[in-house]
Amino acid sequence: MPQIKADIIIAIVSDYRDDDAMEQVKRFWKENPLTQSMKASEEGRVYFVDYYTWGSNMRGPIAADIILEETRQLLLPLAED
């Protein structure tokens, strides 16, 4: 993973059995030296999104609009830097 030179990472998180899955993944990412050594982590450009909206193959036009809006919210602040 450290060889990945991504400017931005969007991590899709899924675990329908655990309401706290997103926080667990964020905590793991933050506490893991390997993930923290990545360029995107060092620059604070790792974003965690919900699988059911972003990754599910059962989405339609409403989910697509939600993804577009979330993408704007995540990435537009980067354009202002």
Image: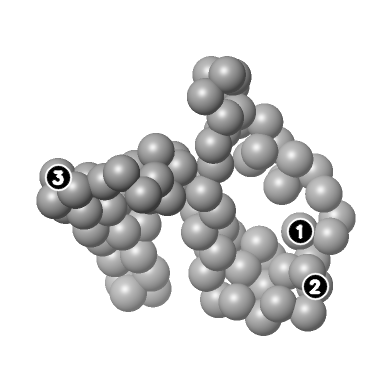
The kind of residue tagged 2 is Pro
Amino acid identity at mark 1: Thr
Looking at the image, residue 44 sits to the left or right of residue 30; the answer is left
Residue 77 appears in view: no
Q: Closer to the camera: disc 3 or disc 1?
A: 3
Dot 1 surroundings within 10 Å: few (below 14), some, or many (20 or more)?
A: some
Classed neighbour count for the residue bearing mark 3: other residues with Cα under 10 Å, few (<14), some (14–19), many (≥20): few
Report the amino acid beneath label 3: Ile
Q: Secondary structure at mark 3?
A: helix
Q: Residue at x 55, y 53 (%)?
A: 11
Please state if 42 lies on the left or on the right of 58 as rendered: right
Q: Where residue 61 sits: x, y (%)?
A: 14, 51
Q: Nearer the viewer, residue 59 or 77?
A: 59
- Considering the numbered disc 2 on the image, is that residue within a helix, a strand or a loop? loop
| Residue at mark 3 | 62
In the image, residue 56 lies at what x, y percent?
Answer: 39, 45
Residue 79 is situated, as x and y percent measured from the top left of the image, at 32, 74
Question: Residue at the location (35% across, 64% down)?
Answer: 75
Give the mark nearer the N terminus: 1 vs 2: 2
57 vs 45: above or below? above
Residue behind mark 2: 2
